[in-house]
Image (cartoon, rainbow, N blue to C red):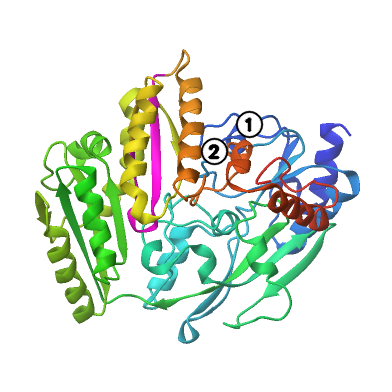
Amino acid sequence: MTTSALARDLAALVGAGNVLAPAPRDYLTEASGHPSGPADAVVLPGTADEAAAVVAWCYERDVVMVPRGGGTGYAGGTAADGGIVIGLERMVRIRAFDPLQWRICVEAGLRTADLRRTVRESGLYFPPDPGAAEQSQIGGNLATNAGGPHAFKYGVTGRWVTGVEAVLAPGRLVTVGGPARKDVAGYDLKSLLIGAEGTLGLITAAWLRLVPAPEAAHPIVAFYPSADAGCAAIEAVFGNGIEAAALEYLDEGAAAIAGPAYPGDAPVGAFMVIAEADGSAAEAARVRDELVEVLGDGALSVETPVPRDLWRWREGVSLAVLARRGGKLAEDVAVPPDRLAEAVRLTVEIGARHGLEAVSWGHAGDGNLHSNFLFEPGGDGRDRAEAAAAELMAAAVGLGGTISGEHGVGVLKRPYLELQLDAPLLVAMRSIKRTLDPKGLFNPGKAV
């Protein structure tokens, strides 16, 4: 089918202004920087029925579909190679909001920040806070089961979902779960769709749980002479039974690069731990004091209170690291928290073996490292970084961890799945894929 004929058919389903053919470059890139192939068109459905009609049209004609959220992914999960890109940016309605029942139903294109602002106006809180909240979309967060700094206390996105609406092959609009907080009827297809990276169907809306917003939140920043000392303090938080809302770290290299912009007093060359206490005013104050006491053991210094823009600075660490040399390859391996210090050291050692500066930061409470290998654009820097990343993933699995803590598999990590998953598990996963997507048209080449 020619591009013009394809665009004409799709325009009849979603409106002429909502089919972009050929696909603009903006829809073929994501935060990972992974090069994408071409796509015949970008289709922007405005309703779930339009999305179902697009999927049915594609399934009848064997046209590949690549679902796309805000483009903030780091695993090549939205890379195209022909077919069409389905963008959900027009699907932003809040279908139901019941503040007294602590629940909301939203469409997949709603941005994370808009959701959090909306519920906060009613004194409620949606805890998952993956980065780029002003750009990321709820559908993309569900597709990758995204985490973030506060996942230590509150869990990843999937924990807050009670139901999803999705389009399955060959174009059937279904709802799994709903506003009920408990539901064990049949297989847990909701959880199967969450984290599947759009390979099993197209999520169009979700029912989400909310909680009352914390009355108070107190960040604490502690600095240590080494990664071993900092990770020992992190383990002490566990050992003392302290339920921090967030428990983050920056290794010495990352802290040195981002340090000049830190909105406080940061010792040069120190390992940094960021924690937060939240809850009622009394609870937050109690947990803050416990954290200060425990994190203070062996620390160079402890800051509390800290500047109000601490978390904004934390979100900018990745850009500061990128600016160091102009290029970086970012991974998100995760290990048991008691192996974090080893993984931090291994990141630096592996980078050195490949002639690369390497730094890491991440979600210490979850053992989730954002390990970055830095290189200058041009030359063989990218190739050396990819070799280093492969070595890191093998090391993470060897420590009892995973090749991906929160970014997903996409195309970038798919070659390394066999490091972690044995043949029977891969066979089972591929069987699920064939059952729900028999033609293999939903985001092919990703996840499994």
- The answer to whether 119 appears left or right of 176 in the picture is left
Q: Which mark is residue 36?
A: 1
Which residue does the image show at 67% across and 52% down from the upper left? 198
Residue position marked by numbered label 2 in the rendering: 30
Instruction: Specify whether residue 326 is in view.
Output: no
Q: Nearer the viewer, residue 278 or 172?
A: 278
Which sits in the foreground, 191 or 34? 191
Q: Is residue 95 magenta?
A: no
Quarter of the rendering occupied by the N terminus = top right
Region in magenta: 360-376
Q: Dot 1, how many residues are within 10 Å of its Cα: few (below 14), some (14-19), or many (20+)?
A: some
**Residue at (54% x, 58% y) in the render:** 145
Among the two numbered marks 1 and 2 on one chain, the one whose residue lies closer to the N terminus: 2
Give residue 240's quadrant in the image.
Answer: bottom left
**What's the residue type where badge 1 is placed?**
Ser
Residue 411 image offset from top left, x and y in percent: 63, 38
Cα gap from disc 1 to disc 2, whole angstroms: 9 Å
